[in-house]
């Protein structure tokens, strides 16, 4: 079992490098998502980077290893949750009078907590995009394996 | 003027690939090329000579900013392109599963 | 008017919730979708009432941003007219789906896609920002590409691929023309854009942008030179989706958007002549291609091309009479064409084929389906008491009054050919002797019957809209937006 796992995926060099870098990539993606309102980037760009971290992991270790951590149902559930989060922030705007109204406390410019509800919207979009992109990748891989049988 | 014509050339290359190529994957790639040409064109409309990126920062004032709106719109358009491309690739894989080929001339079960 | 964004929010919310709850609870998606579409239908009727009693224009500022800077949503005569058409049909189609979609696995995915498409269409209708229009157009289109391929059989995938390529190219043209308009006018808000264009005047850039819009929306609406994808794509989808695609999608994506853009830029003589020519061409080519078909759904799809030609012809004439005829025909066509597609779905549901050769004598076995199909056939071919007659009459009258007698003759000939083609459908499918396949046919389940009956009733009484007392509340406000 153990040796079987070792043989899956790419070579030892790739696996070691992946182990070192994947955390950094993930962290960078999260940074981009959280700082979307004060620097370039935002939910979409950060989400794509997070998805790339997962895809990186999958390329290095093979699909079974990753599917153990992130099953397809879990991915699709979280993806829908991201969409619902974003939409519910938009609907919360009704409390301020208009759809999408940003009535949260604004804070000081150029600080992390400064732009009202934009940071929460960015988190929702980041969740949706990262898991959506990863889900697309996953589904395409599973489709291909089905076709070969 | 040259960048605009280069964009047009890129767009025409994309459309040529969509119309003329027989492989489904190449058609999809052609579509992506055409889409990026349109996006580039849109960005170019917002560009000013010697313009700077439209990002505020706490320490300095920025003059001669390029128009930020086309960039925001193009970002949206890229997201849409991602969705379309993903769907197209998924359908291409399904077609390969059913027909056993990527050749568009051999995929002709429909009459029209 | 705080409820305006609900036309987009409710279907989107429904789509996301169904995509993760529907997997675990089977009947949830049925009930939830129907509640949402019913609510939307009521809201659209309520907005007719509001529009006629209080102000005739409502502007909603999304996020509280003032119109030229933020995105705004607008409710005026034309958008209410389209909202009512779309949302009535969406409700009846989801009602039909409760029974019909049982033969497919994972029904909740279907509802998710359908609600996304509905959100896109409602968004196109209520938005007042051209880029936002493009975004909603893409949401509706991507959902419809996926819905065409829903059965994942080889023909359906092929049709979906063809449709997707055509649709994506159309979207590129639309995006390109939005870029041109933005570079010329530096604004995206429709009202602001119209103002700027009025001040700066229309030059070659705007004309070029308009031609690109015509190509893009013409591809989406399947007007004749751009129609090649429609007869493949529409029959390949499941029957309720064919009804939604033929009934409302091509009209919202193609015709409504084209009208909106042309009210911004202003209709000139050349443009209206082009529209009339394309309309006349669509009428004749569509119906001639339809006559030879033996596949029921394919025949109906070709008729969609020809009937869209009537709408384009009516709108192209540009007189108040012609425009109200075109809009009236838009409403009528969405009703009777979706009824016909639902009939074909009902036949496919019981005997499992849509080839006219293998049907026959279904009149005795399926009385309600055949009666409703007869009403719809008479409507589409313009037989007097039904709604199709009145709208075609208005279009032909408008042609003659404005001096385009040739186009009037084309419209009448198209109508006669339509009649002959539907006599063929009736003869093969419902009359004559029982074929082998129709022996074991039986009437469809109750929700399907209910949806078809309601549509047939609207077909029968829809002609009343021609009277001034009723039509003034529904068609007149929409017509006044187009012809000022």
Image (cartoon, rainbow, N blue to C red):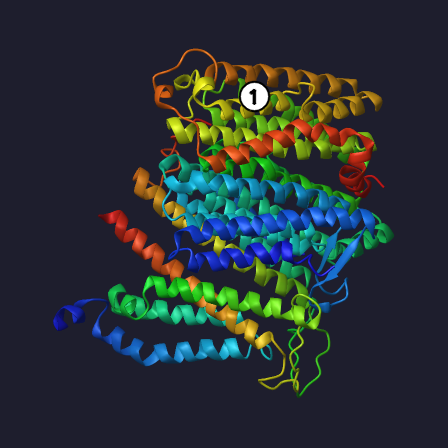
Residue C110 drawn at (x, y percent):
45, 47
- Residue A36 in the figure: left or right of residue C315: left
Image mark count:
1
Residue C90 drawn at (x, y percent):
57, 43
User: Where is C356 relative to B40, above or below?
Assistant: above
For the residue pair B72 and C39, the one nearer the viewer reads as C39
User: Where is B81 relative to A42, above or below?
Assistant: above
- The residue shown at (87%, 53%) is C199
For the residue pair C241 and B77, the one nearer the viewer reads as C241
Return the residue at label 1: C374
Q: Chain of mark 1?
A: C
| Residue at the outermost front position | C446
**SS class of the residue under badge 1?**
helix
Quadrant housing residue C372: top right
Residue B54 drawn at (x, y percent):
66, 73
Which corner quadrant holds the N terminus of chain C?
A: bottom right
Quadrant housing residue C318: top right
Quadrant housing residue C404: top right
Is residue A19 visible in the rendered image? The answer is: yes
Is residue C175 visible in the rendered image? The answer is: no
For the residue pair C229 and C211, the one nearer the viewer reads as C229
- The residue shown at (53%, 52%) is C116
- The residue shown at (65%, 48%) is C42
Residue C324 drawn at (x, y percent):
77, 33
- How crowded pointer 1 is (Cα within 10 Å; few <14, some 14-19, many 20+) is rated as some
- The residue shown at (77%, 58%) is C59
Which corner quadrant holds the C terminus of chain C?
A: top right
């Amino acid at each position: 079992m153990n040796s079987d796992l070792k043989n899956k995926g790419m070579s030892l060099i790739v696996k070691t490098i992946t182990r070192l870098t994947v955390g950094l990539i993930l962290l960078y993606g999260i940074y981009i998502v959280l700082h979307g309102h004060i620097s370039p980037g935002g939910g979409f760009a950060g989400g794509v980077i997070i998805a790339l971290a997962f895809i990186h992991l999958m390329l290095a270790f093979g699909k079974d290893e990753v599917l153990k951590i992130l099953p397809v149902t879990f991915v699709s559930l979280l993806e829908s949750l991201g969409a619902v989060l974003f939409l519910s922030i938009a609907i919360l705007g009704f409390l301020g009078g208009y759809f999408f109204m940003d009535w949260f406390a604004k804070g000081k410019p150029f600080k992390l907590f400064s732009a009202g509800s934009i940071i929460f919207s960015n988190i929702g979009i980041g969740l949706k995009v990262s898991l959506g992109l990863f889900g697309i990748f996953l589904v395409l891989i599973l489709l291909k394996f089905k076709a070969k049988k | 003027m040259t960048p605009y014509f280069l964009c047009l050339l890129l767009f025409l290359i994309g459309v040529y690939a969509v119309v003329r190529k027989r492989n489904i994957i190449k058609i999809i790639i052609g579509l992506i090329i055409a889409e990026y040409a349109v996006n580039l064109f849109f960005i170019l409309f917002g560009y000013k000579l010697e313009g700077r990126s439209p990002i505020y920062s706490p320490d300095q004032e920025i003059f001669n900013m390029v128009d930020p709106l086309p960039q925001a719109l193009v970002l949206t358009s890229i997201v849409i392109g991602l969705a379309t491309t993903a769907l197209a690739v998924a359908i291409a894989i399904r077609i390969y599963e059913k027909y056993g080929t990527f050749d568009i001339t051999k995929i002709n079960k429909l009459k029209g | 008017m705080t409820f305006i964004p609900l036309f987009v929010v409710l279907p989107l919310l429904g789509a996301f919730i169904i995509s993760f709850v529907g997997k675990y609870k089977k009947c949830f998606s049925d009930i939830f979708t129907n509640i949402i579409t019913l609510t939307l239908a009521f809201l659209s009727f309520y907005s007719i009432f509001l529009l006629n009693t209080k102000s005739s224009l409502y502007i909603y500022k999304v996020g509280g941003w003032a119109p030229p800077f933020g995105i705004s949503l607008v409710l005026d005569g034309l958008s209410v007219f389209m909202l009512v058409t779309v949302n009535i049909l969406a409700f009846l189609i989801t009602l039909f789906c409760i029974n019909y979609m049982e033969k497919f696995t994972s029904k909740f995915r279907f509802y998710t896609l359908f609600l996304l498409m509905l959100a896109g269409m409602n968004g196109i209708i209520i938005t007042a920002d051209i880029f936002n229009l493009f975004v909603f157009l893409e949401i509706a289109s991507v959902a419809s590409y996926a819905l065409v391929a829903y059965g994942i059989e080889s023909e359906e995938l092929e049709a979906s691929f063809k449709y997707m390529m055509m649709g994506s190219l159309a979207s590129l043209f639309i995006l390109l023309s939005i870029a041109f308009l933005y570079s010329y006018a530096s604004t995206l808000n429709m009202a602001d854009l119209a103002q700027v264009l009025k001040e700066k005047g229309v030059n070659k850039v705007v004309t070029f942008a308009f031609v690109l819009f015509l190509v893009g929306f013409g591809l989406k609406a399947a007007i004749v030179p751009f129609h090649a994808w429609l007869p493949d794509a529409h029959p390949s989808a499941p029957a309720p989706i064919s009804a939604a695609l033929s009934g409302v999608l091509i009209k919202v994506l193609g015709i409504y958007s084209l009208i909106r853009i042309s009210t911004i830029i202003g209709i000139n003589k050349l443009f209206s002549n082009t529209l009339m020519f394309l309309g006349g061409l669509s009428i004749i080519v569509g119906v001639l291609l339809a006559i030879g078909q033996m596949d029921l759904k394919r025949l109906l799809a070709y008729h969609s091309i020809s009937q869209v030609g009537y709408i384009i012809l009516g709108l192209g004439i540009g007189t108040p009479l012609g425009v109200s005829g075109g809009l009236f025909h838009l409403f009528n066509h969405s009703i009777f064409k979706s009824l016909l597609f639902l009939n074909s779905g009902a036949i496919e549901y019981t005997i499992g084929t849509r080839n006219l050769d293998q049907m026959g004598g279904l009149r005795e076995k399926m009385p309600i389906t055949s009666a409703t199909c007869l009403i719809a056939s008479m409507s589409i071919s313009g037989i007097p008491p039904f709604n199709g007659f009145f709208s075609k009459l208005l279009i032909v009258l408008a042609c003659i009054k404005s001096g385009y007698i040739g186009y009037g003759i084309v419209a009448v000939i198209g109508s006669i050919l339509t009649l002959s083609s539907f006599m063929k459908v009736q003869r093969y499918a419902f009359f004559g002797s029982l074929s082998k396949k129709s022996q074991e046919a039986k009437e469809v389940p109750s929700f399907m019957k209910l949806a078809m009956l309601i549509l047939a009733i609207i077909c029968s009484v829809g002609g009343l809209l021609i009277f001034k007392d009723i039509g003034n509340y529904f068609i007149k406000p929409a017509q006044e937006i187009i012809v000022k």
